[in-house]
Amino acid sequence: MAFTPAYQTAYQTDPPVILVEITAYTGAGTEILRYCTGTGTVVGGNFYAPRIANPGSIKTTLFADGTTSGESELGYGEVVLVNSDGGLDAILDYGLDGRPIVIKRVLGGVVLLLMSCTMEQPVVTTDDVSIRIKDPQALFEVPVQLNKYAGTNVLPAGLEGTDDIKGKEKPLLFGPAFNATPERVNTSRLIYQGNDGALQSIPCVYDKGVPLQAGANYASAAEMEATAPLPGQYRCWLGGGYFRLGSSPAGQVTFDGVEGADASQRTAAQIAKRIALRILLTSDLVAQDFVELDAANGSEVGIYINSPTTLREAMDQVLGSIGAWYSFDSAAKLNVGRLDAPSGTPAMHLTSAEILSLERQATNDEGRGLPAYKVSVNYLKNYTVQQENSLAGRLGYTPELWETHQLPSVLYWNGAAFGNGLFVVVGDSSSAAISADGAAWEARPLPYTEGAWMAVTYGNNQFVAVSRLSNDAATSPDGVTWTARSLPDTSTWSSVAYGNGLFVAVCNGGEDPTSYYATSPDGVTWTARSMPSERRWVSIKYLNGLFLAVGMGNVIATSADGTSWTEVTLTENRSWVDVAYGNGTYVILEGAAPGKIMTSVDAANWTLRDMPPLPGSGAWSAVTFGNGEFAAVATNTTIMATSVDGITWTQKATPSANYWAKVVAGNGAFVVIPDVNSDVCALYRTARYWLTREYRTELAIDLSVLTKNPHAIARTLFMLLVNPLAAQAEAARFLDLHKVRRDYLLITCKRTALPAQLPALGKTAQVTYPRFGYDAGKLFIFIGCETHLDSDDVTLYFWG
């Protein structure tokens, strides 16, 4: 509510008095110095000397000026006291820096707290004393870590390092961290520290990217110093955040660590609370805010700090990872919240009656307030980005290297290719999807609205796709914009490949075998051709200088130029579904369970071999070669297999059961797509790939935004989230928040026209004004306030 009429009358007949209370250290102890505007006053039995020449102003915002996400910004102001008589000269010898300053207003005998801040050391002149006041957030402009290594080891004993790390901040870990660099605190005993405090676990330690074997945890620091692990092992003393190696490392040592008892203690809200409590007391926090922030997003985040970092920087990173903010209210209590679309009952209502001026401004966000059509969230930070040549020659497989990611829609996805740094998959309903990394996918429409696209390939600087039960084809230089093309005839086109300057598309004939196929030099003009005999051709690829086509039966076909073919009769009559080549070996795969392969070094002489068994009704469906190994996937199972030589295969686990139909290699990854109604793809990256990159990426996209806003932008966010589904959800939330028109307002009012106590930042407000479509009222988020105590004007900042 606003000031009552009685208070407004009092304001006119008895103007408000501003009180300033300064906590100073005088040498004998702390003392509160009290000053006021006007002629002097007594409040609460204390006299306030009439020394205030200018009570100043202070501005506080949730984010940096003009922005709605990212780093926070400190607010500053200045109080000027009269000193022409020299009565305040003694302040020169007082300690004010970093101490509290409280500003109040007295109106009609009622005292109202305006702000509680900190201050800097004053500037004292012959005429005045100027005191710069700061948002209480200035408390966070201190190092998050005060503990440093003493450098006092007497080798081989000690955990404080030697002179080489003396004075260096000890590392801190909050939540989980991946591939972080620990501090070596004992060079003789190979002891490392990953956190200045307890850890829940150290799941893995790496030497040149190779996981070491974990031994039993130590019970104490003394046991750790006294007992070495076995060679090739590491053992942890979790109580101090340490681990010890059993043998000298071959290269860089890194580790995965987890702090926090369980997932509920590893959220942005809980980690921010632990960071804030390094300098604040529990009573300085608005506890309910942290509960509500956990309810808004309880995903795990993790931050590893091993270089000079302030509390503010750490808070910004942690809370920014879920689009959250933090601020101190007028009582200097720490508030937290998340920036969401305004909703609910407004805490403040402004109309033309209260508003002196209203300005609608562009934000300082990326794109200056333009809507977003795409949001990329970088997550699961790799805290030690390593060079390719610094890693071991071959890194082991772990199931954790598999991830599931969301395709743009639920479809039968039938074909996949990699080219020009881009994965492209095609499916039913004339749909395609593209991705640079196999994780973050964008939908792209194909021609012919009823198209059931079966296969896609890349060659001659373009992608070419073919469709079944039609003569539809399409080409694209970038996977984004597709042009309709026509094949020579309507048929069940099953596969397409490019090599030796020619695209070749084959048919599986449906119910009837066929010799029909087609070629094109450019994907535009196609020529009908015939194979030597009628077959149900399922797959064709260009491998090691040869087109190789496989299908049902005991015959495959090879061609150097795509027009002259040689049929090879196999010893086995089976349903061959795919073919691959690598490390000097051709492999053809049977689409069955338990399933067989045949291998050859020349594509002419073939040897039958076994594949790993599949559980239940699983059947092998596709094979490819990339990243130095073969990979085969299967339908209706959680099993896949890899092989270096194509002969000896190792069974491995995928992240979930699905009808995995196609696998394609590229950019250090294998991408697997399903051929049932599904929007889930699987991604397997080698450990080497992730160790050389800082982040993984999820995205959300809405191309319809470009229809109304052709200049809509793509936003990129860097977050400390660790789960791909959480990153995907945050990308989608941020896109929903920013793909529509959002207004950023500066509204100036008289203080007496506003509620006696302004709501905290982050609350919802309603603005009713005869411009910009606000006639019936529009909800906004209150994101900033600048109080001008000298003029009694207040500038309020809103977003919504």
Image (cartoon, rainbow, N blue to C red):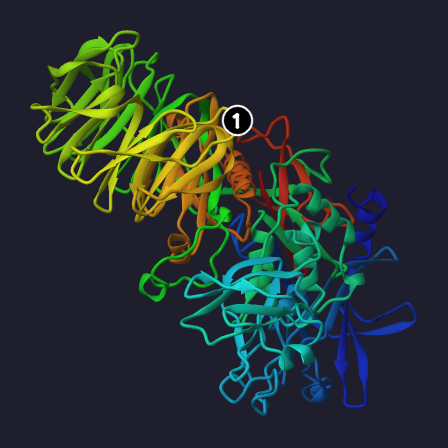
Along the horizontal axis of the image, is 125 left or right of 518? right
Vertical relation: 798 (above or below) 224: above
- Residue 183 shows in the view: yes
- 242 and 716: which is toward the camera: 242
Give the residue type at disc 1: Gly
Residue displayed at 58% across by 38% down: 800
Residue farthest along the front direction in this orientation: 571
Residue 187 location (% of width, % of height): 51, 83
Residue identified by numbered label 1: 616
Along the horizontal axis of the image, is 342 left or right of 539? right
Along the horizontal axis of the image, is 609 left or right of 604? right
**Kind of element beneath mark 1:** loop
Vertical relation: 73 (above or below) 683: below
Residue 295 location (% of width, % of height): 70, 42
Along the horizontal axis of the image, is 481 left or right of 519? right
Vertical relation: 745 (above or below) 790: above
Vertical relation: 611 (above or below) 294: above
Residue 608 location (% of width, % of height): 29, 33
The image quarter containing residue 125 is bottom right
